[in-house]
Image: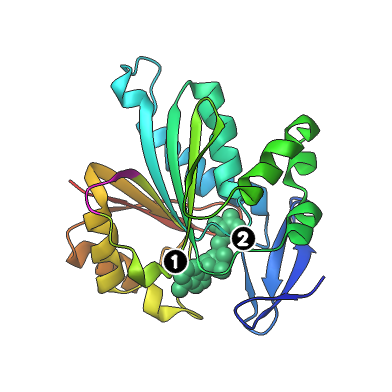
């Protein structure tokens, strides 16, 4: 299927773990790792992001986690965060920023509920995309979603999030999104002890994060990638 929003053709392809993603041929860039979209999303954002805030004896306040996703895209990260939050008993306030929303035809073709063997949640995945932009929506009793159609460069939140999923396209194609000034915005948007996770492990990205005050850890990467980064606002 070919769609156009930011004047780039979007094509749905299958990655090595059998799950689908979107490919931008003009940029030779994927929305997720070609080595496994679902695997990568769980590894980077759930295992190294959400689980950073979880242990079995959390008090009720610590169960409330506020997440900013930079690049809502296919909604895969929001969907698996909601599923995991149910298992872990967490309450999530999720804000997804996206300039170029995908089309409903693409949502259906990506078909993540079937790929995750939870066909009974197909309506929920659809609902993540159908809800109006710019307003908070209760998707389930533990998951509130606000989608903001906005350029990343215009994010102006202050001290608002525990966790940022930084999932922009790579620095090769969008270098302007991996700069000190963007990471400064991310730093300001996080609460103290907040965490930003990203699939990237580039040295220049790590240094930009450190220069704005983050303590940066290298973590093992998902399949096909040696490392990824976790940045903490200490
Ligand atoms: C790597 S993909 C995101 C993948 C997404 N997290 C997912 O699971 O599908 C990057 C996303 O950032 C969006 N994007 C690119 N440049 C942007 C910008 N300047 N402002 C806001 N969104 C942008 C793209 O449309 C795309 O959806």
Looking at the picture, tell me which residue is in the foreground, 187 or 64. 64
From this view, report whether residue 187 is shown above or below residue 26.
above
Looking at the image, residue 26 sits to the left or right of residue 149; the answer is: right
Disc 1 versus disc 2: nearer the observer: 1
Residue 41 colored magenta? no
Question: Residue 24 location in percent, x, y?
Answer: 67, 76
Q: Considering the image in quadrants, where does the N terminus appear?
A: bottom right
The residue indicated by pointer 1 is 150
Question: How packed is label 1: few (under 14 Cα within 10 Å), some, or many (20 or more)?
Answer: some
Question: Residue 90 location in percent, x, y?
Answer: 45, 25
Looking at the picture, tell me which residue is in the foreground, 41 or 128. 128
From this view, report whether residue 111 is shown above or below residue 9.
above
Could one spot residue 15 in this view of the protein? no
Residue 6 figure quarter? bottom right
The residue under the point 22% across, 62% down is: 210
Question: Residue 159 location in percent, x, y?
Answer: 22, 48
Tell me which numbered mark, 1 or 2, is placed earlier along the sequence.
Answer: 2
Disc 1 within 8 angstroms of ligand 1 (CB): yes
Separation of residues labelled 1 and 2 (CA atoms): 21 Å
Looking at the image, residue 169 sits to the left or right of residue 19; the answer is: left
Helix, strand or loop at disc 1?
loop
Q: Main secondary structure of the magenta part?
A: loop
The residue indicated by pointer 2 is 32
Residue 161 colored magenta? yes
Residue 32 figure quarter? bottom right
Helix, strand or loop at disc 2?
loop
Question: How packed is label 2: few (under 14 Cα within 10 Å), some, or many (20 or more)?
Answer: many
- Which region of the structure is painted magenta? 158-162
Could one spot residue 78 in this view of the protein? yes
Question: Residue 178 location in percent, x, y?
Answer: 37, 72
The residue under the point 44% across, 66% down is: 150
């Amino acid at each position: 299927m070919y769609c156009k929003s930011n004047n780039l053709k979007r094509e749905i392809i299958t990655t090595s773990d059998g799950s689908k993603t979107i490919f931008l041929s003009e940029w030779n860039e994927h929305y997720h790792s070609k080595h496994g979209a679902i695997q990568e999303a769980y590894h980077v954002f759930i295992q190294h992001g959400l689980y950073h805030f979880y242990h079995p004896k959390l008090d009720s306040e610590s169960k409330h986690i506020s997440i900013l996703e930079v690049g809502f895209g296919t909604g895969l990260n929001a969907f698996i965060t909601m599923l995991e939050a149910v298992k872990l008993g967490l309450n999530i306030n999720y804000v997804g920023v996206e300039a170029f929303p995908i089309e409903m035809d693409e949502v259906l073709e990506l078909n993540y509920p079937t790929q995750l063997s939870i066909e009974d949640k197909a309506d929920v995945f659809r609902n993540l995309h159908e809800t109006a932009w710019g307003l908070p929506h209760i998707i389930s009793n533990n998951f509130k979603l606000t989608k903001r159609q906005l350029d990343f460069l215009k994010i102006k939140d202050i001290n608002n999030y525990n966790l940022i999923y930084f999932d922009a396209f790579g620095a090769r194609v969008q270098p302007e999104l991996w700069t000190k000034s963007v990471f400064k915005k991310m730093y300001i948007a996080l609460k103290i002890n907040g965490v930003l996770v990203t699939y990237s492990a580039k040295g220049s990205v790590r240094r930009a994060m450190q220069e704005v005050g983050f303590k940066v850890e290298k973590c093992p990467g998902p399949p096909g990638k040696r490392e990824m980064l976790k940045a903490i606002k200490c």
